[in-house]
Amino acid sequence: MPDKMWRVVDLLDWTVGYFQQNGIPNPRLDAEVLLGHLLEKSRLQLYLHFEMPVFQEHLTPFRELIKKRIAHTPVSYLTNHKEFMSLDFYVDERVLIPRPETEQLVETILMTETGDFQRLLELGTGSGVIATSLAVQQPEWEIVATDISESALAVARKNAETHACAAQIEFLSGDLFEPIEAINTNGDTRFDWIVCNPPYIKNTERAALSPDVRDYEPEVALFAGDDGLAVIRRLIAEAPKYLTPGGKLILEIGAAQADTVRTLLDAESAYCTYELLEDYAGKERVVLASIS
């Protein structure tokens, strides 16, 4: 980035070109988000202030952000922000970056459930976006959220506090149902809903992933054995023990896993009904299963 008097428009144009040269997938969007983050302006505000000069106090940190983006550090880790269900969430390298398609889990729960009070368990909460979004939408619900990573739980608690629902969510540390089993001394801890966005990528698919994902996001939140189903198998097998009569399990799966997941569900007699819901691309990505 040569020394000169930079305007917003000049800086964006130069950055877009530099990102294009280095194979960054969304050069214009990334340039706008990063510069807007530093200048504390929305993308629209950047366009309304195209002629505004950008001085050294912002140029220096912007150069550092560009270097990190060229090294494929995800934009959300550089800004520490990600929108989910129209809410702003803090994210960093301790947690998976929330994907827009995961919003379908929250939307399906909210569209399906008509009762005033529900007990909901989220497994592998990560940044806490699912649990927190549901708590914001349904303040009368009782929510428990678990994660195997203590550092991820710290991020989830931070997000719950930001959205003023920390008192509504009990965060527990452990692998899937283990922390529930630890408090389930009488065997009567049951939930109306169990929700999970599990890891479902095959170990053999690691090399094919974008470096943004492979090199930066937590492995424990991405990979699930040689077939990508290690965690999903456990969820399907173990969830009925923790569901109330008529309770529901909802989880996200990989785009090519629907047929195998059907076989797993058919093998579990506890489920009386199930359906696989399509995402906006027409792929069966969400499992909704009920016990009798």
Image: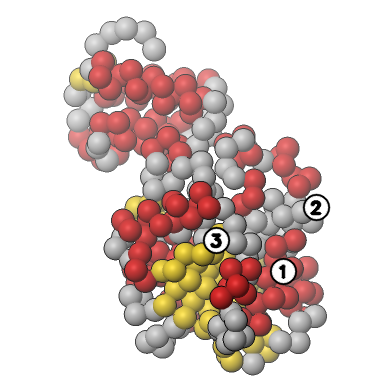
Q: Residue at x 52, y 45 (%)?
A: 94
Q: Is residue 59 left or right of residue 189?
A: left
Residues marked 1 and 3 touching at CB (< 8 Å): no
Q: As rendered, which of 93 and 109 lies closer to the eye? A: 93
Q: Residue at x 44, y 56 (%)?
A: 156
Q: Secondary structure at mark 3?
A: strand
Q: Which residue is mark 1?
A: 234
Q: Which residue is mark 3?
A: 173
C-alpha distance separating marks 1 and 3 = 18 Å
Image quadrant in which the N terminus is located: top left
Q: Residue 121 placed where, x, y %?
A: 52, 73
Q: Residue at x 64, y 46 (%)?
A: 219
Dot label at residue 226: 2
Mark 2, other Cα within 10 Å: few <14 / some 14–19 / many ≥20? few
Q: Earlier in the sequence, mark 3 or mark 2?
A: 3
Mark 3, other Cα within 10 Å: few <14 / some 14–19 / many ≥20? some
Q: Label 3 is placed on what type of residue?
A: Ser
Q: As rendered, which of 12 and 121 lies closer to the eye? A: 121
Q: Label 1 is placed on what type of residue?
A: Arg
Q: Is residue 137 left or right of residue 105?
A: left
Q: Secondary structure at mark 2?
A: loop
Q: Residue at x 32, y 7 (%)?
A: 3
Between circles 1 and 3, the one closer to the viewer is 3
Q: Is residue 279 visible?
A: no
Quarter of the image where one finds residue 45: top left
